[in-house]
Amino acid sequence: MASEPLKIGLLVGREWSFPPAFIEEVNGRNEGVVAEYVRIGAPRMDDPAAYRVIVDRISHEVPMYRTWLKQAALMGSTVVNNPFMWTADDKFFGAALAESLGVKSPRTVVLPNKSYIPGIKHDESLRNLEFPLDWPGIVEHVGLPCVLKDAHGGGWRDVYICRSLDELIRDYDQSGLLTMVVQEFIHWDQFVRCICLGQEQVLPMKYDPRERKYIVDHGHLTPELGARIVGDAQKLCRALGYDMNSLEFAVRDGVPYAIDFMNPAPDMDIYSLTPEYFRWAVKGMADMTLRLAKLPPAPADNRWNRFLGGRVPR
């Protein structure tokens, strides 16, 4: 009697080119592993793992999915990306982490929220905060222009280029409940966006942030700069535990600064990546998830730190 094929489940949102291409790539290899869209209703806490691997492209927008993915990991599924590692996803921690790894990062300051949920009383609930803020000291540290952004945001939302102290305070005053960081603005000579898969495979791509457009150019980096960017991307992804990530580097005077590198559901659309880079992403994702699916089940270990470690293909 033939054994059931191993299964890879794909959890997706509003993307239309990557999901069918990925499923076709995996299934077309005929390696005893089947990829399909995840179907989920109202899971029970003791449901067994239905998939050896789950590729998560949407739980950052659907909290219920994140809750279920943790249970799936408990039951033995390998989730890409590890749902327990998303707790590290904030730009202030990221900047500090990069510097600790020897990866250059813009000078970064985290700001108290401008507004708070009902029930927070400033004179009682916020007694640990110093007020007023030393705005001139903040600007002296990061310089002008500077970048004000949501510490937990993405997709270019809630990002402001502030060219004066007045602009910085004005934009901060509009931030509401968001936790904001203010960063040094890197006047870049080159801009590079990378996709990193399995914490190992890195594709550095020329990128125009003004047009938000990839440019196919295989000679845009010197061998030395390319090797440094690849190495920095690997360091960051290994420290974060992300097996699927995109990272941005602003290059100033030959030095790459990691300015955005916590994108664990990176853009993989054919129309933005270009067909050539899209094919690389689809093939790389299939390679990684097939390798993960064929690994023997991990031994039972239900301690919290085990889930933070995840499963990494090597």
Image (tube, rainbow, N blue to C red):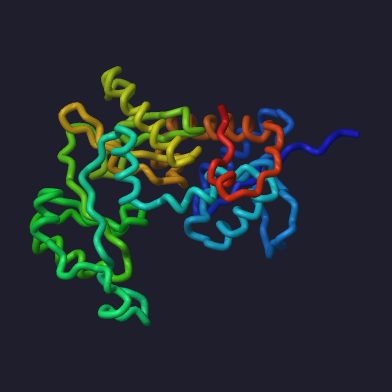
Look at 34% across and 42% down and name the residue there: 97
Q: Please identify the quarter of the rendering in which residue 224 is found.
A: top left
Whole-percent x, y for residue 116 in the image: 32, 74
The residue positioned 42% from the left and 50% from the top of the image is 88
Between 195 and 297, which is closer to the camera in this rendering?
297
Work out which residue is located at the far top of the displayed protein and give it. Answer: 223
Q: Position of residue 164 (x, y in %)?
A: 8, 57
Residue 3 lies, with reference to residue 211, above or below; the image says above
Q: Quadrant of the C terminus?
A: top right
Quadrant in which the N terminus is drawn: top right
**Vertical side of 238 occupied by 10: above or below:** below
* Relative depth, front residue between 110 and 214: 110
| Residue 251, x across and y down, in percent | 22, 33
Q: Is residue 159 visible?
A: no
Q: Is residue 113 left or right of residue 314?
A: left
Residue drawn at x 59%, y 44% as measured from the top left: 306
